[in-house]
Image: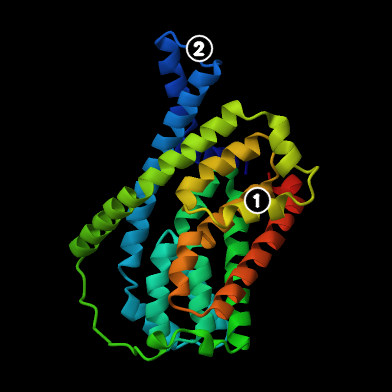
Amino acid sequence: MQVIKGVWNFIQNQILGMKWLNGLIGNGLSALGLDISNRWIASIQFFVYDVIKITLLLCFLIYIISYIQSYFPPERSKKILGRIHGIGANSAAALLGTVTPFCSCSSIPLFIGFTSAGLPLGVTFSFLISSPMVDLGSLVLLMSIFGTKVAIFYVIFGLIIAVIGGTIIEKMHMEKHVESFILTAGSVDIESPDLTKKDRLVFAKEQMLSTFKKVFPYILIGVGIGAVIHNWIPEQWVTSLLGSKNPFGVILATLIGVPMYGDIFGTIPIAEALLYKGAQLGTVLSFMMAVTTLSLPSMIMLRKAVKPKLLALFIGICTIGIILVGYLFNFLQPFIV
């Protein structure tokens, strides 16, 4: 058992977490005669280490997930979801969201397509909630930063929010609050061509490059903010606002995260730095969930597809779910970190 635990710790710390890379960068800076205890040099070390680590994980994960995604084109996904009913359909849609785009703005066109195809509204909303919040990439990246237990609980709780949220929307019969052009658009069934292994590898490479180009600026911004928090923001500031002494820290973090735009790869460095400075686990994860699921640009895009009442219900369900999960993580923190 100890051997298995040791092997897993090696995978988590040295392969996923790339602790060796941080040491290598620190040794390189020291070899140049720079003092890594200096805050400016420590900020450079944090920035270079996190940018390289997240970029490598990003490219690897997107390539693998895009290859898997090539087996689930929209037409096939519609057929699969169309054969399932009830909460099983919501669960299937939430799980499908784990192998689809990495931010909410990319998920909304698929949501519109599924709704136009006649899939139940609650099912399509379960997909829309889970897709940016709990993709497989977030699972591996969270494992590299926060550990296996936190990553698994994060994905489970995210899927629960997606299933319950979609079920509530379905039970409330909100179809009349979808814009008419979507409901009347119908769907054209186009048979997806059978892809060869080479075609799938090419598709995965193209998706990786395309996503990398879109996401990399947010990685730089997120890691830059994380470096400032990690080395320049006094710990007492963070703990007073987002630590255990503030019972409203989860609510504050969620409300701060909602208007921002980013993805899991850009928000994790900020969450990592906040946790290091004394913020509670559930508080930083609530911030991450809010940024990835309820960003202002994606809500503006979604408003073109649904009417204000349905949009407000969607935001309300996600916000309440994220806040509840945040407080639950704060309660579980002593047991899983």
Is 149 placed above or below 160 here?
A: above
Location of residue 307 with respect to 151 vertically, above or below = below
Residue at 62% of width from left, 87% of height from top? 171
Looking at this view, is 239 or 5 the one in front? Answer: 239
Q: Measured from the top left, where is residue 322 in percent x and y? A: 65, 61
SS state under label 2: loop
Image-based side of 70 in relation to 326, left or right: left
Q: How is the image coloured?
A: rainbow
Task: Mark 2: give few (<14), some (14-19) or many (20+) Cα within 10 Å.
Answer: some
Residue 248 % position (x, y): 76, 52
Name the residue that disc number 2 marks: 35
Q: Amino acid at mark 1?
A: Ala
Which residue is label 1 attached to? 253
* Cα–Cα gap, marks 1 and 2: 34 Å
Residue 327 quadrant: bottom right
| Residue 184 location, quadrant | bottom left
Q: Is residue 315 above or below residue 325?
A: below
**Is residue 251 at all visible to an observer of this figure?**
yes
Q: Nearer the viewer, mark 1 or mark 2?
A: 1
Is tag 1's residue or tag 2's residue first in the polypeptide sequence? 2
Q: Position of residue 258 (x, y in %)?
A: 57, 57
Amino acid marked by disc 2? Asp
Q: Badge 1: few (under 14), some or many (20 or more) residues near its Cα, within 10 Å?
A: many
Q: Nearer the viewer, residue 179 or 334?
A: 179
Q: Is residue 149 visible?
A: no
Q: Which mark is residue 50?
A: none
Front residue (pair 217, 87)? 217
